[in-house]
Structures are given as C-alpha cells and as structure tokens.
Amino acid sequence: GQNIDQPTEMTATEGAIVQINCTYQTSGFNGLFWYQQHAGEAPTFLSYNVLDGLEEKGRFSSFLSRSKGYSYLLLKELQMKDSASYLCAVMDSNYQLIWGAGTKLIIKP
Amino acid sequence: GAVVSQHPSRVICKSGTSVKIECRSLDFQATTMFWYRQFPKQSLMLMATSNEGSKATYEQGVEKDKFLINHASLTLSTLTVTSAHPEDSSFYICSASSGGAMETQYFGPGTRLLVL
C-alpha cells in the first residue's frame, strides 16, 4: 500500500531551527509537496521537490532523497506565526496526491 | 497569483437540506479542480477530481449522488451536498490546478459546514 509517515507533533523555540521529516512509500513518484496549514484554515503551498537535493526559499528549505524515500522541511529563525501543521504529500505514478497526516509544530517563546 | 476562493466560508443548515459550495480560481484557468474533506485533527481526504467540461471522478466510498460536482467552466466548480445529515458536518476544501493533476494544487480557504 501507499504510505506517508511524518511525526505527529514537534515543539521548538522561537528563533531556533526545526526539521520536519517525511518518509514515503508510494507506487511511483512524481514529486513531493509541503503545505502549511494553520488551525481552521486551508493548506497553503510551501514547496515542491521532484529532483534530489535541497530547495531553499527564504526561511524555509525542503530536501528530497528519492532513493531513500525521504524528505524534510527545514524552518529557520522560527517565528510564533510558524505554529501550524505541516503536511507532506507525494504525487504517485497516477498523478494522485497521497497525503501524510501532518505534523503539528508548536513554537514556544 | 494562483488565488482560489470559496463561498460560503461557513454554513449552518438543517438536516435534509442541500448545500452548494462554490470554488473559483480568480487569476488562472483551472483545468482540474479537487474537492477535499477534512475532519478535525485529521489529514485531507480527497473526495473527487473534476476536469472542466467532464464528469467528476469520485474516490472510493464517496457517494456521487450525494456529493454533486459540476465543473462548468475553467474558473468555477461547485460541490452540492444533497440531503445533508449531521455526519456530513466537516471542513470542505477545494483546490485548483492550471495544468491538470500533475501540477501544484492551490487551495481555497475552505467551507465549514455544520448540519444540525
């Protein structure tokens, strides 16, 4: 079956760095997405990786290793507004998005 | 760019009534639109995928006669929850893609439905 694993919850301190991991097993691979979802709101797109390596976008970076079925989202200089759920999603060979359950990130002052 | 709107943002209705939710892509043409449902503290669950001008493809377990989807234009898709029941209360979110299912999806703000 298809499976996306990410930690349920993480806690970090304002100003620090946090890494949210995502491992996947899917039938085929056509890219991996990270979305941010604040409580009660819809997800917003953060990043897309289809080739191995690190993609940097401001305070957020996303890494992909296709051979390991692994990705991480790195958040630097954490701000209180970064408290949210972070969803990892993989597009399979049928171009269907397989969603992880999300990682709830709690930022403490 | 890539702005998607949804209307209404919140709706409360009586059991047995029908509710229509609109999803619009404001600054791009959405070849494909997706409808999701999200229960509290759970991840998104895809309900159906619709391409402009054709019938929607429903996921297993989603009743097509209960959740009517119309994608009449490249900027508008509607989801109608027919004869709504309390168990249909959920957060309904649409997303849109300009290049089909293989492209990045951009989400609308969601519609919170409460059926009494």
Image: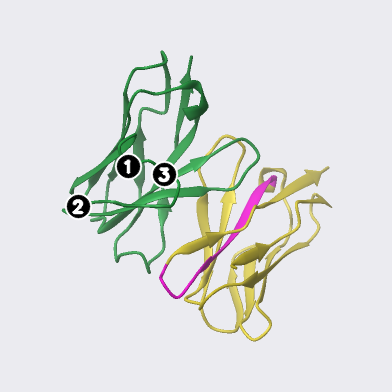
The disc, 1 or 2, on the residue closer to the chain's N-terminal end is 1
- Colour displayed for chain B in the image of the structure: green
Which amino acid does the dot numbered 2 rest on?
Leu
Horizontal and vertical percent position of residue A69? 65, 78
Q: Main secondary structure of the magenta part?
A: strand
State which mark lies toward you, 1 or 2: 1
The image's mark for residue B62 is 3
Q: CA distance from mark 3 to mark 2?
A: 24 Å
CB-based contact (under 8 Å), mark 1 and mark 3? yes
Residue at image position (60%, 42%) is A38
Does residue A105 appear to the left or right of B13 in the view shown? Answer: right
- Is residue A93 shown in magenta? yes
Horizontal and vertical percent position of residue B24? 28, 43
Mark 3 falls within which chain?
B
Q: CA distance from mark 1 to mark 2?
A: 21 Å
Residue at image position (35%, 40%) is B5
Does residue A72 appear to the left or right of A43 in the view shown? Answer: right
The disc, 3 or 2, on the residue closer to the chain's N-terminal end is 3
Q: CA distance from mark 1 to mark 3?
A: 6 Å
Residue position for label 1: B64
Which chain is rendered yellow in the image? A
How many C-alpha atoms fall within 10 Å of the one at disc 3: few (<14), some, or many (≥20)?
few
Q: How many marks?
A: 3
Q: Which residues are magenta?
A: A83-95
A10, above or below B62, in the image: below
Do marks 1 and 3 both belong to one polypeptide chain? yes
The image's mark for residue B74 is 2
Which amino acid does the dot numbered 1 rest on?
Lys
Q: Secondary structure at mark 2?
A: loop
Q: Secondary structure at mark 3?
A: loop
